[in-house]
Amino acid sequence: MPFETEQITLDSGIVVLALSGTMTMGNLLQRLEFVVRDLTKENQNRIVIDMSKISYLDSASIGVLLNCSALVRNAGGQLRLAALADRVLATLKLVGLDGLLPISPSREEAVSEITPPHR
Amino acid sequence: MESELSSTLESTVESVDAAEESVRRFAQDAGFADEDVYFMGLAAREILVNAVVHGNRFDPNKKVTLQLSLEAGRFTIDVLDEGAGFECGAVPDPRLAENRERLSGRGIAMAKAIMDEFSVEKKLPRGTRVRMVKRKA
């Protein structure tokens, strides 16, 4: 199944990136990192990545998610993953990386857990 | 039930998709549980990608060989490349705190965590064979 990204900007300014398909090396994966990089350049650095429609991911994808997280963190923002399927979460746990990426059970909870920007 | 399957892959990431699918089918036919089939496919993908990217370095003149066998409830996956080889001990373990954000070694660590046995053998004059075994519960 091809990897796709849908971008939704909420009234709060939080950007939701809703992913679907399979996340594997060479499967348009790098595009996600470019999207996140562009968002941080535009100071849109409060981001939720909704993984509810991702059925499979490999180690290259985990690398891209870690890079996205670092990009946002370095820009002073917040990034949360949301709604991971059991097997996707189990894949992250295989190499103990689930603790490195903030994860929420649902998109709504991830959005509520992102704090407002400092004024 | 005993069975074997051998296939030769081009050194491309695209060729890994079909090879991974053949591992899943083989494991399914061998009677492994769905959960095991899913993760054994992932382990195979990681080592196949490693062979294409780090072993053969996408060289179109080099091939990757995938061999599957089932014997006495042991499912063996052999992945052979024609590259310069690598020392498994030299690959950083991403489960260690100091390596968690490093890019290399994650795929091998995943495969090791999924499979019951994992070994790396350097071939002469060149190439590496990674052997992974999963035992049926």
Image (cartoon, coloured by chain):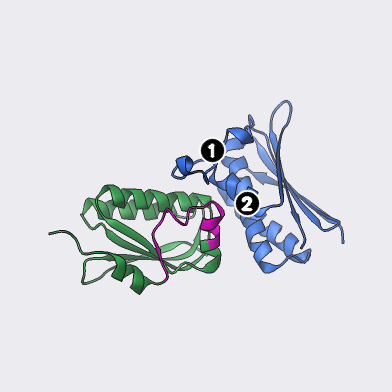
Chain colours: A green, B blue
The answer to whether one can see residue B56 in this image is: no
On the image, numbered disc 1 is attached to which residue?
A: B92
Residue B28 placed where, x, y %?
73, 65
- Local SS, label 2: helix
Q: Which residues are magenta?
A: A90-105
Camera-side residue: B97 or B23?
B97
Query: Mark 1 — on which chain does it sit?
Result: B
- x 43%, y 44%: residue: B101
- Residue A56: image quadrant is bottom right
Q: Amino acid at mark 2?
A: Ala
* Labelled pair 2, 1 in contact (Cβ < 8 Å): no
User: Residue B10's mark?
Assistant: none
User: Residue B113's mark?
Assistant: 2
The answer to whether one can see residue B69 in this image is: yes
Q: CA distance from mark 2 to mark 1?
A: 15 Å
User: In terms of sequence position, does the residue under pointer 2 or pointer 1 come before the other?
Assistant: 1
| Badge 1 density bin: few <14, some 14–19, many ≥20, Cα 10 Å | some
Camera-side residue: A28 or A91?
A91
- x 38%, y 48%: residue: A67
Q: Is residue B36 magenta?
A: no
- x 51%, y 40%: residue: B104
Query: Mark 2 — on which chain does it sit?
Result: B
- x 25%, y 49%: residue: A75
Q: Amino acid at mark 1?
A: Pro
The answer to whether dots 2 and 1 both sit on one chain is: yes
